[in-house]
Image: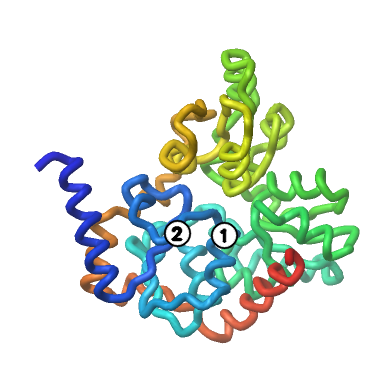
Amino acid sequence: MSQGNRTKELQEEILKLKKGENIFLPAHNYQRPEIQEIADVLGDSLELARLAQKEIKADTIVFCGVDFMAETMSILNPDAEIYVPEPKARCPMAMMCPKNILIKAKAEHPDLPVVLYVNTLAEAKAEADVICTSANAAKVVKALGAEKVLFGPDKNLADYVEKKTGVKTIPVPEDGYCIVHVRFAPEMILELKRKHPNAVALVHPECEMEVQNVADIVGSTSFMFNYVKESKEKEFIIGTEIGLIERMKREIDGNKILIPASEKAICRNMKLNTLEKIRDVIINKPKENMVKVPEKVAEKARGALEKMFQLTK
């Protein structure tokens, strides 16, 4: 059997199992294309967090992303059974901001609001005043009305927020970063702009400020997707994980030219999820694949997430 036929067979098997068991299958934009194709919904952290806030009429959620995203689903859907295809699909950035580092920073700056990126584990979210995403970080920080905030864990997103709002951001930790977006260098963007002078260069705010400064537009993955879809321009340099580009190629006008800022911009952790693992978790529902945030932690984290929704209405 060819790989293409095997993929199609697995997709059909999953769709049949999913329908029979009333399973909801959300997936992040960085998932493998064969997973994107059968997901009930695709999105970035903000879109999936908003989805989680609503009532999901499914007995079981199988979340295709990384650990902190599944935890967020659990926090906002405490009565649902939530599984991940691969428990080892963890976000390195989220692991850079454990609870103890945040508590120490809060003790050193007791009067400052704590704004945490959604790319954090539940134990850290429980220590925050409000959560943000790359799509709404500047709006959240500005809405707080503070002159300074503690902001973690992505230093580059903190710099972006400070530039956009004028609010001083104190990063926690000092050098948190996304292992994919720090691979981009300004020279890469400039060289592609020389080769494609008519292209619009879009990069993610997790990129270093030097990269943001040479781009035409800085925005979240949802912003990039909508911009490319609605723009009258024809050529785009895309500075984020290649999974988004694969989605764009599938869902946006084929006449638009999509140029990856780097073919090597791959989140190996996101790609740990596979069709085989999705099928197996639906059939077997192993305990080690279940995600359930303890209610004491979830209650505190839920408050910080709900404040984000209130501030960004």
Q: Amino acid at mark 1?
A: Glu
Task: Identify the residue at the far left of this view.
Answer: 1
The quadrant holding residue 226 is: top right
| 236, 83: nearer the viewer | 236
From the top left corner, tell me how far across and down residue 202 is, in percent.
Answer: 63, 34
Q: Which mark is residue 47?
A: 1
Question: Of 238 and 122, which appears nearest the observer?
Answer: 238
Task: Say how the picture is coloured.
Answer: rainbow
Residue ID at (40%, 74%): 82
Chain-order first, disc 1 or disc 2: 2
Which x, y percent locates residue 19? 28, 70
Helix, strand or loop under label 2:
strand
Contact check, label 1 and label 2, Cβ < 8 Å? yes
Residue shown at the point (57%, 73%) measured from the top left: 53
User: Please, is residue 273 above or below residue 207 in the view?
Assistant: below
Q: Position of residue 175 (x, y in %)?
A: 66, 48
Percent x, y of residue 56: 47, 75
Q: Which residue is mark 2?
A: 41
Foreground residue among 136 and 117: 136
Q: Residues within 10 Å of mark 1 (few under 14, many from 20)?
A: some
